[in-house]
C-alpha cells in the first residue's frame, strides 16, 4: 500500500462457488477496483488483464486481432490470447518447462529400459528348462525369439493401455487445476507406440538368448549357451 502497510481491510459482502463463476475452481476474491487503485503504491490506473467473452468461439481470432490493433503503437500495447495460451505462457515464465519435462521423461525412460531389460533377462533365465522343452517340441529359434517378443508386447502394451485409461479417468479432475489440459488422440497413439518400443528393446537381448538356447545343455541344468 502507498502508506507502507501490507495489511488490507475488506468487508465480506458475499461468497460464490465454482458453478456461480463458471470456472473449474474458484480460488480468487473480487474486490472494488477504485478502493484498490487508490490504496496501492505502484501501477496506479493500470490493470494486468481483462477477460473478454465472445458470443461465438469462431469470432475469437477476429476479436483478438481487433483489440490488439486498437492499442497497437500505444503506450500500453495489448496481447490478446485464449485462456489456454495464457496458462502456457505462465508455465513458460518459470523457465524452459518443455525442456525440463522432456529431460525428466527421458531419464525415466532410460532407467525404465535398464530395469525392464534386466527383468526380462532374469525371467528368461528362470524359464530356461521350459524354453528347452518348447524347442524340443519343434519350435525353431526364430519362433522362440518371436514368442519372447510377443510376450513382452502383451505385458508392456497392457501396462500402457492401463496407464492411459487411468489418465483418461483422472483428466477431468486435473483439468480443474490446469487450464487447457487435454489428452488428444495423438497422445494415446504415442503412449502405445512408446510401450511397444520399450517392449521390443527390453526383450531383444533375452529373446536372442532364448533363441540360441541349446536344448541338451539347458535340460542338463547349465542354462543358455
Image (cartoon, rainbow, N blue to C red):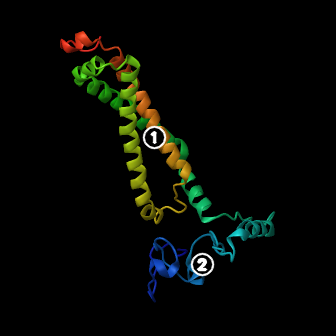
Q: Around disc 1, counting alpha carbons within 10 Å, would you say few (fewer than 14), some (14 to 19), or many (20 or more)?
A: few
Query: Is 11 or 80 nearer to us in this picture?
Result: 80
- The single residue placed furthest to the bottom in the displayed view is 13
Q: Is residue 193 left or right of residue 157?
A: right
Asked if 83 appears above or below 112 in the picture, the reply is below
Q: Are marks 1 and 2 in contact (CB under 8 Å)?
A: no
* Mark earlier in primary sequence (1, 2): 2
Q: Residue at x 50, y 49 (%)?
A: 188
Instruction: Find numbered disc 1 in the image and state the secondary structure of the residue it sits on.
Output: helix
The residue tagged 1 is: 105
Q: Is residue 168 left or right of residue 79?
A: left
Q: Residue at x 44, y 61 (%)?
A: 174
Q: How many marks?
A: 2
Query: Picture coordinates of residue 163 (x, y %)?
Result: 39, 49
Query: Is 112 or 163 nearer to us in this picture?
Result: 163
Query: Picture coordinates of residue 164 (x, y %)?
Result: 43, 50
Query: Picture coordinates of residue 90 (x, y %)?
Result: 56, 57
Asked if 65 appears above or below 106 in the picture, the reply is below
Asked if 122 appears above or below 83 in the picture, the reply is above
Numbered mark located on residue 39 in the image: none
Query: Picture coordinates of residue 183 (x, y %)?
Result: 51, 55
Instruction: Find numbered disc 2 in the image and state the secondary structure of the residue it sits on.
Output: helix
The residue tagged 2 is: 37
Q: CA distance from mark 1 to mark 2?
A: 45 Å
Q: Is residue 201 left or right of residue 47?
A: left
- The single residue placed furthest to the left in the displayed view is 220
Looking at the rendered image, the quarter that the C terminus falls into is top left
Query: Is 194 or 131 nearer to us in this picture?
Result: 131
Q: Give the image quarter of residue 38.
A: bottom right
Q: Residue at x 64, y 64 (%)?
A: 82
Q: Around disc 2, counting alpha carbons within 10 Å, would you say few (fewer than 14), some (14 to 19), or many (20 or more)?
A: some
Can residue 217 be seen in the rendering of this structure? Answer: yes
Amino acid at each position: 500500500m502507498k502508506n507502507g502497510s501490507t495489511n488490507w481491510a475488506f468487508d465480506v459482502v458475499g461468497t460464490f462457488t465454482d458453478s456461480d463463476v463458471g470456472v473449474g475452481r474458484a480460488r480468487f476474491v473480487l474486490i472494488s477496483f477504485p478502493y484498490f487503485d487508490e490504496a496501492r503504491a505502484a501501477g496506479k490506473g493500470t490493470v494486468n488483464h481483462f477477460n473478454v467473452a465472445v458470443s461465438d468461439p469462431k469470432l475469437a481470432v477476429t476479436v483478438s486481432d481487433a483489440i490488439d490493433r486498437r492499442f497497437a503503437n500505444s503506450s500500453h500495447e495489448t496481447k490478446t490470447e485464449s485462456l489456454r495460451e495464457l496458462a502456457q505462457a505462465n508455465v513458460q515464465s518459470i523457465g524452459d518447462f518443455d525442456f525440463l519435462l522432456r529431460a525428466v521423461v527421458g531419464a525415466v525412460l532410460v532407467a525404465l529400459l535398464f530395469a525392464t531389460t534386466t527383468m526380462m533377462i532374469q525371467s528368461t533365465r528362470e524359464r530356461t528348462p521350459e524354453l528347452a522343452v518348447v524347442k524340443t517340441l519343434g519350435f525353431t529359434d526364430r519362433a522362440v525369439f518371436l514368442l519372447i517378443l510377443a510376450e513382452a508386447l502383451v505385458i508392456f502394451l497392457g501396462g500402457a493401455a492401463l496407464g492411459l485409461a487411468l489418465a483418461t479417468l483422472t483428466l477431468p479432475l486435473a483439468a480443474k487445476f490446469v487450464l487447457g489440459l487435454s489428452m488428444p488422440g495423438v497422445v494415446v497413439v504415442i503412449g502405445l507406440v512408446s510401450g511397444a518400443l520399450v517392449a521390443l528393446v527390453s526383450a531383444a537381448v533375452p529373446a536372442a538368448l532364448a533363441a540360441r538356447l541349446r536344448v541338451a545343455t539347458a535340460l542338463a541344468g547349465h542354462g543358455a549357451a
